[in-house]
Image (cartoon, rainbow, N blue to C red):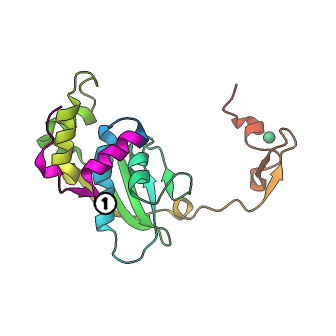
Amino acid sequence: MRAKPTRLRDKTICSVPVGKFVERVKDFHGATAPGVILGGYMVELAYRNLPKGDILFDALSETRTCLPDAIQLLTPCTIGNGWLKVLDLGKFALSLYDKSNGNGIRVFVDPAKLESFPEIRTWFFKLKTKKEQDLDVLLDEIHAGGSQVCGFMPVRLKPDIFAPRRHKTFRVCPICHESYPATDGDCCRACSGKTPYL
Ligand SMILES: [Zn+2]
């Protein structure tokens, strides 16, 4: 194994030493996925630019791939606690926002900035197969570049995204006899044709 560049030694992502973050990614995600590592730098960039103070923030990922895991590893926001939402727009972008008013920061990978980072660019646009790309070289470039390949902007989330109506009452479905939100109608959504199972 090649020695890791010394600059990683003191580097942190959201106060977590980079080496520790990389280990956590491997444990949680199952591999040292470049997308989760880059996602870590993206979470940090968003976090750094949030208004200071005791705000409670939620997260939105615009892709199902990699970014939700970076968010779950570095923030209190998880899919399960409802503080992380995934809206699959197929874009490698995320935002952290104040859950009381929907104001936040969106971070995205800026293709123009990728020109100076050929390995990241090749990986990002899938110009080589996974086999052809040297993972160590790519990861070194991600750690060297960090959030330099990203842009960020202030955003305001739509109320139906940041303050969705909660399911108030539940009833038992007359067809499958399981519970479902009463607002869904006379039977559960699965029984009305939305079941994912054959
Ligand atoms: Zn049902």
Residue 30 left/right relative to 148: right
Residue 48 appears in which quarter of the rendering?
bottom left
Between residue 4 and residue 93, name the one nearer to us.
4
Residue 185 left/right relative to 114: right
Identify the image quadrant of the N terminus: top left
Quarter of the image where ligand 1 sits: top right
Disc 1: CA contacts within 10 A as few (<14), some (14-19) or many (>=20)? some
Residue at x-position 43% and y-position 47%: 68
Residue at x-position 38% and y-position 56%: 74
Q: To which residue does mark 1 refer?
A: 14
Residue at x-position 76% and y-position 38%: 192
Q: Position of residue 70 (x, y in %)?
A: 38, 49
Query: Given the image, on which type of amino acid does mark 1 rest?
Result: Cys
Between residue 154 and residue 61, name the one nearer to us.
61
Which segment did they paint magenta? 1-27
Residue 10 appears in which quarter of the rendering?
bottom left
Q: Secondary structure at mark 1?
A: loop
- Tell me if residue 50 comes above or below residue 84 in the rendering: below
- Tell me if residue 130 comes above or below residue 159 in the rendering: above
User: Would you say residue 10 sits in the magenta stretch?
Assistant: yes
Q: Position of residue 147 (x, y in %)?
A: 23, 53
